[in-house]
């Protein structure tokens, strides 16, 4: 008897479905939908939004690196913090040809906030405070709306 179905090629590639034809067919959400962004990416976007808001008033911020780290490090680099308060951000002054840095710690900020709006407000406060420290100004000078929430 003749077999009307052609046999499968012997070179097997990665299996995308299970043997019953089921399984993931594609991503759950397209990349442009906020659901597809990880929590770390969404947090980095909040920091970037805050920086862009401040750069309109302070163009010299383009020379400062803004970094998001998960948690503060306990090392010998001079970043000392007590058991009572975990820092939400920090600064690293410019030296040896490297630009100054503003660091925002994601996990401590997330733990202290309940929703996206509250998180965005706290991120902006942290960024304003750290920029003020770097520039030697008060937070109210950096952003006149600081502390109005």
Image (tube, rainbow, N blue to C red):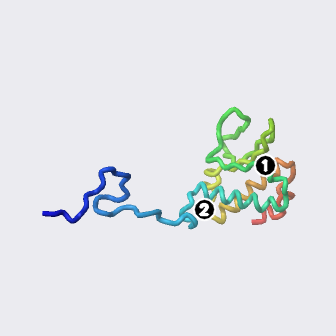
The quadrant of the rendering that contains the N terminus is bottom left
Locate residue 142 relative to residue 83 in the image: left or right.
right
19 relative to 67, above or below: below
Residue furthest top in the image: 76
Locate residue 106 relative to residue 17 in the image: left or right.
right
Residue at screen point 80% across, 59% down: 55
Determine the secondary structure under disc 1.
Answer: loop
| Residue bearing the label numbered 2 | 114
Residue furthest left in the image: 1
Mark number displayed over residue 64: 1
Q: Nearer the viewer, residue 132 or 40?
A: 40
Residue at screen point 60% across, 62% down: 114
- Residue 19's x, y, as percent? 28, 59
Determine the secondary structure under disc 2.
Answer: loop
- Residue 60's x, y, as percent? 84, 53
Residue at screen point 70% across, 62% down: 121
The quadrant of the rendering that contains the C terminus is bottom right
């Amino acid at each position: 008897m003749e077999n009307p179905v052609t046999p499968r090629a012997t070179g097997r590639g990665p299996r995308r479905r299970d043997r019953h034809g089921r399984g993931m067919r594609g991503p759950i959400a397209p990349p442009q939908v906020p659901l597809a962004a990880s929590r770390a990416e969404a947090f980095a976007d909040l920091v970037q939004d805050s920086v862009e808001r401040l750069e309109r008033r302070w163009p010299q911020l383009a020379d400062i690196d803004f970094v998001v780290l998960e948690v503060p490090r306990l090392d010998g680099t001079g970043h000392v913090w007590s058991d009572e308060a975990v820092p939400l951000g920090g600064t690293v002054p410019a030296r040896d040809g490297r630009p100054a840095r503003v660091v925002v710690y994601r996990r401590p900020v997330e733990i202290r906030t309940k929703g996206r709006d509250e998180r965005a407000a706290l991120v902006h406060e942290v960024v304003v405070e750290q920029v003020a420290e770097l520039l030697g100004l008060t937070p109210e000078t950096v952003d006149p709306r600081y502390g109005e929430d």
